[in-house]
Image: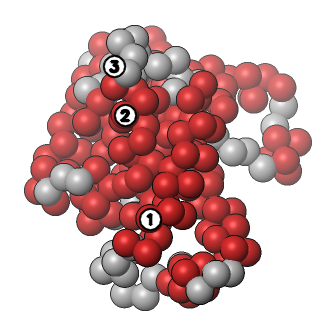
Amino acid sequence: MHDPDQGLVERTLAGDLSAFEKLVQRHQGVAYRIAARIAGPDEAEDITQDAFLRAFHRLSRFRAEGSFRAWLLQIVHNTALNVRGGRRSEPREEVESLVEATAADELERTPAERLEDRERRERLDSKLRMLQPAHRAVLVLRDLEGMSYEEIATVTETPLGSVKGRLHRARRELIQILRENTYDWELPK
């Protein structure tokens, strides 16, 4: 498996700072979304910047056994957990700030449709916050970010079997939460 970021990593290690800028541009969206999901949107920007700074300073320790993206998201994940661990309350998350809608898509939809979509995202977000943090993390990484099981195992530093088990339990737990409030989702009992 060839890592599309390997060339940029090598150029950065050789002193080309513009190569690292390209890595930041390529991965800042997913890094921000992961940070916001774990620690909340109020902390996400700081966590993302801190994670990229840590990645830059630790780049010489990056072993190309896995992808740069997975290695970076592991740093983001751990940084966000450290920030979250310092607080007792559940983070206030707003899915709307995490979803990147294209301008063309927004123009095609009516204000009522946009409002309905935003309300659905907010309801889903509130349901996701009811999941156990370990379950929520794997669900977000797999189903919202589209990461492979192996990447999730690397990011969360969890065995592959545990990732699969947590994802199964997370999905089952989310379905149960959604069924308990059928008004929101119009799911059959």
Indicate which label's residue lies in the foreground, 3 or 1.
Answer: 1
Secondary structure under tag 2 reads helix
> Which amino acid, by three-letter code, is at mark 2?
Asn
User: How far is disc 1 from disc 2 in space, using C-alphas?
Assistant: 18 Å
Residue at label 3? 130
Q: Nearer the viewer, residue 168 or 178?
A: 168
Indicate which label's residue lies in the foreground, 2 or 3.
Answer: 2
Q: Position of residue 61 (x, y in %)?
A: 37, 72
Q: Visible in this render: residue 169? A: yes
Q: Nearer the viewer, residue 19 or 171?
A: 19
Q: Position of residue 161 (x, y in %)?
A: 11, 56
Q: Visible in this render: residue 188? A: no
Q: Nearer the viewer, residue 90 or 95?
A: 90
Q: Which of the colour schemes (rainbow, by chain, secondary structure, one colour) is used? A: secondary structure
Indicate which label's residue lies in the foreground, 1 or 2.
Answer: 1
Q: Position of residue 164 (x, y in %)?
A: 18, 52
User: How far is disc 2 from disc 3 in space, using C-alphas?
Assistant: 20 Å
Secondary structure under tag 1 reads helix
Describe residue 15's horizontal placement relative to residue 70 as left or right. Answer: right
Specify which label sits upstream in the sequence, 3 or 1: 1
Q: Is residue 173 above or below residue 123?
A: below
Residue at label 1? 58
**Crowd class of label 3 (few under 14; some 14 to 19; many from 20; radius 10 Å):** some
Specify which label sits upstream in the sequence, 2 or 3: 2
> Which amino acid, by three-letter code, is at mark 1?
Arg
Residue at label 2? 82
Describe residue 75's horizontal placement relative to residue 173 as left or right. Answer: right
